[in-house]
Image (tube, rainbow, N blue to C red):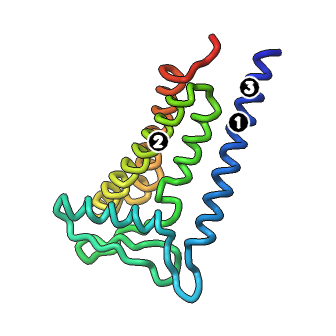
């Protein structure tokens, strides 16, 4: 019976946290994305695009980020060639929400929970910027692999990192009853 209570408690904390953060993020997007009379991405997505541009320029590519004129996305232009779009789903916030929900659902000390949430969220956020930079260059250099890179390789990397962080949390940090 105790085992069932633990599972139910985990699910309530996970889905409760996820729902709360999802609603807050949806509200943020509703207040910050513009669809009329022109299009503009939310500041967090613009920031991801700007940081990606800085990284790509730093490694020697001539990159321009340009707000799409017909949708809420930012075009990634490498050496005057459009190679990708950064949409709201590319800013890693949805993955960070999922990550945080899982961390909160597993019991840990308050301090370790807060530190792991902040550290892991920052790691996911910046890893995502590197991921977007690498996928942009990979698509620029190898356009024939665009679909495989975008739909398989790069989601695997970001979700793999998130899973690794969860694994570390559960095995090394969270205080589970054994």
Neighbour tally class for label 1: few under 14, some 14-19, many 20 plus, Cα within 10 Å: some
- Quarter assignment of residue 5: top right
- Write down the residue under mark 2: 118
Between the residue at mark 2 and the residue at mark 1, the CA separation in whole angstroms equals: 18 Å
- Write down the residue under mark 3: 7
Say which element carries label 2: helix
Task: Identify which residue is drawn at 62% across, 10% down.
Answer: 178
Task: Identify which residue is drawn at 46% across, 48% down.
Answer: 155
Neighbour tally class for label 2: few under 14, some 14-19, many 20 plus, Cα within 10 Å: some
Q: Position of residue 18 (x, y in %)?
A: 66, 46
74 or 173, which is in the foreground?
Answer: 173
- Write down the residue under mark 1: 13
Say which element carries label 1: helix
Of the image marks 3 and 1, the number of the one nearer the N terminus: 3
Task: Identify which residue is drawn at 63% across, 70% down.
Answer: 30
25 or 53, which is in the foreground?
Answer: 25
Q: Position of residue 93 (x, y in %)?
A: 52, 54
Between the residue at mark 3 and the residue at mark 1, the CA separation in whole angstroms equals: 10 Å
Mark whose residue sits in front, 3 or 1: 1
Of the image marks 2 and 3, the number of the one nearer the N terminus: 3
């Amino acid at each position: 019976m105790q085992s069932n209570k633990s599972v139910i408690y985990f699910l309530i904390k996970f889905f409760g946290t996820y729902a709360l953060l999802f609603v807050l993020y949806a509200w943020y997007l509703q207040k910050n994305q513009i669809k009329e009379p022109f299009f503009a991405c939310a500041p967090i997505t613009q920031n991801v695009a700007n940081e990606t541009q800085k990284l790509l320029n730093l490694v020697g590519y001539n990159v321009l980020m340009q707000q799409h004129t017909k949708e809420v996305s930012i075009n990634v232009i490498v050496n005057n060639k459009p190679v990708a779009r950064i949409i709201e789903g590319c800013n890693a916030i949805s993955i960070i929400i999922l990550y945080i929900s899982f961390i909160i659902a597993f019991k840990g000390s308050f301090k370790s929970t807060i530190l792991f949430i902040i550290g892991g969220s920052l790691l996911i956020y910046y890893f995502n910027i590197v991921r977007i930079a690498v996928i942009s260059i990979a698509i620029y250099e190898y356009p024939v692999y665009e679909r495989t890179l975008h739909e398989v390789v790069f989601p695997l990397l970001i979700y793999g990192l998130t899973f690794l962080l969860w694994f570390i949390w559960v095995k090394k940090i969270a205080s589970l009853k054994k």
